[in-house]
Amino acid sequence: MEELVNLFHGFAVALQPYNIMLMVLGIVLGVIIGVLPGLGGANGVAILLPLTFSMSPTSAIIMLSCIYWGALFGGAITSILFNIPGEPWSVATTFDGYPMAQQGKAGEALTAAFTSSFVGALFAVIMITLVAPLVASFALQFGPAEKFAVYFLAFCSFVGLSKEPPFKTIAAMMIGFALAAVGLDSITGQLRLTFGVTHLLNGFDFLIAVIGLFGIGEILLTMEEGLAFRGGKAKIDLRVVLQTWKELPKYWMTSLRSCFIGCWMGITPAGATPASFMSYGIAKRVAKNGKNFGKGEIEGVVAPETAAHAAGTAALLPMLSLGVPGSPTAAVLLGGLLIWGLQPGPMLFVEQKEFVWGLIASMYLGNLVGLIVVLTCVPIFAAILRVPFSIIAPLILVLCAIGAYSVHSSTFDVMLMLVFGAIGYLLKKCNYPLAPLVLAIVLGDKAEEAFRQSLLGSQGSFGIFLSNPLVSTIMILGLIALFWSVIQEGYTRLRGTVAGPGSRAA
Amino acid sequence: MTTGSSSNTGPTHKLVEAGVTLAIALFGVIVILGSLKAGINWGPEGPRAGFFPFYIGLFILASSAINLWHGLREDNDGLFAEWGQLRQVLSVVIPTAIYVGSMPFIGLYVASIVFIAWFMRWLGKYNWIIVLAVAFGMPIVTYFIFERWFMVPLPKGPIEEWLGL
């Protein structure tokens, strides 16, 4: 089996002492990022991306992806101990995690959360190992029309699946596309939408947007709430860990189901958050003691954590094999690939074997290292949370400024970051989703290129997007995803249960 | 603009949301105008530069119109935020704007020291020893990590030059 050989080569790369050091560093930074308000996974990776410019791409992606794993782990700590979800997908973890902590079972809840995260991630990585090469070799045959269809599907799933109103999702997404279009047009070499401002010649960098929208915007939201941390103490000793581990296999069914939900939802964009809620909801309905959910049931921690981590990991599958990231953080990693001179997408598996398999191997190792780090260091990370916000906030703001500056060594970008921060605050308050905006900035140029090349091939006829079975299938899947909420509503209405106000789609 | 349910005042959610939606629509108009300038029809090498963004602009405009309609129809007279909360937000935005604006002239390090110190002293009310420790400690650590270890140059002003960094 060729893949297995490649994977072992990958392990050899990932197990170099320098890379292991980066892995541990990445995990620790990632957990800190996940724990602190205003520093989510996407934003944290974006700030630290410039640090990797001098590294080899493989070492760089190992460190950055480990930051991502760390952030996923870190989200659980704040959810359980402080009832503050560090990331949107840890919201469901608070439902049972926080009550457990209040009952003095914080150790059990944390152990269950970390272990489930690990199980979910492991499952997703195995899936990536097996499926990604297949998807990539399949995608090698894609022409521009198929490529555009994949982007279409990705963006439609955002509209259909996100909990925000569909037209707000579309508006946010289109803002992203418009921002991506600013500057030099990659096909004709013509300038557009710059309105004579020289700073805009190169367009808007999505890293600046990520740091502003997620980082600064989040700080402003926290300031408004005047958040004061009042959290429980956390202590995990070996006895609690072993005891919890003895109990966990009882929930293998929940785990397995959550793994599948997570992988499935993670591949489609906007996946991790709905995956965690869906997994929690199903577990609550199916479990024997489902009516105790919300009062501190360990199964209620296992289900969302497994699904969220599986989804977060699975989000890297389309990023690697198709060049379509499944989450904002995966989008930032994809941006990193572009900066290091790698073309994400199916060719990566042919041309950059060492890089791809080094990354996949590091996913196995990174999650293992992560589990050990978080289990042993929880008290330290919890202590970070007790540092008052008025110390943390200026430090994060300075870090954001440094991150924004070092992308292009431009102070104009730092100002732009603050503007994006204010916009992010307003959009978030008005219930506009930010993830599709960022993804559209990242993918805008590529989607447009695929779109125009397809039209060029067909002399301007839109029929090209339905010209063969493959492209038609993807486009139709996209349309189904786009109208998913309408279809669902129509279905329930057919059954005569709900006749609520309809949201009609154009 | 007070609401019965809350004793505190502030702008209503409806008003702010309408404003945001209109701003987005305006952005859509700008995109459409820019696209028209770049050319939205077909040229010798296929669709011209403004072709794609033109339709994006139309989408922005259309979805904003629907959002505005939904937003105004909604029965939500809650507050966007209380004035006190907005003051808190502005107490971060304005100093950050000054911080960011002064960076090209005095460099990142000096600006950061002043900014952190200001934030901790006025918003956090810490005593000067802690304030100075954090305000100087963080930029110094940053200097070593970014410039020495990872060799990422950060903006410097006259004081750094005078120190020979």
Image (tube, coloured by chain):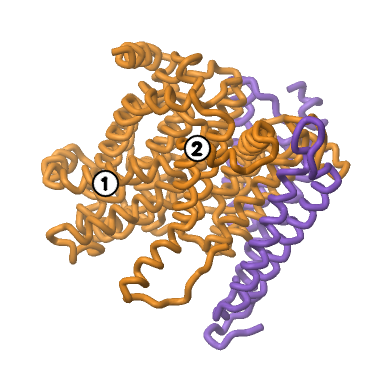
Q: Quadrant of residue A285?
A: bottom left
Neighbour tally class for label 2: few under 14, some 14-19, many 20 plus, Cα within 10 Å: many
Q: Where's residue A166, x and y in %?
A: 53, 60
Dot 2 and dot 1 within a common chain: yes
**Secondary structure at numbered mark 2:** helix
In this rendering, position of residue A218 left or right of residue A232: right
Chain of residue at mark 1: A
Residue A20 makes an appearance in the image: yes
Identity of the residue drawn at 61% across and 28% down: A50
Vertical arrangement, residue A463 with respect to residue A304, above or below: above
Vertical arrangement, residue A305 with respect to residue A318, above or below: below
Residue B129 makes an appearance in the image: no
Q: Which chain is purple?
A: B
Callout 2, which amino acid? Val
**Quick one: label 2 or label 1, which is nearer the N terminus?**
1
Residue on which disc 1 sits: A258
Chain of residue at mark 2: A
Callout 1, which amino acid? Ser
In this rendering, position of residue A366 left or right of residue A465: left
Residue on which disc 2 sits: A471
Evaluate if marks 2 and 1 touch, with contact meaning CB atoms under 8 Å apart. no
Identity of the residue drawn at 20% across and 48% down: A254
Q: Quadrant of residue A94?
A: bottom left
Chain A pictured colour: orange
**Secondary structure at numbered mark 1:** helix
Separation of marks 2 and 1 at Cα, in angstroms? 31 Å
Identity of the residue drawn at 62% across and 25% down: A339
Q: Where's residue A326, x and y in %?
A: 46, 40
Q: Where's residue A251, x and y in %?
A: 15, 47
Residue lying farthest to the bottom in this orientation: B4
- Nearest the eye: A475 or A254: A475
- Nearest the eye: A71 or B155: A71
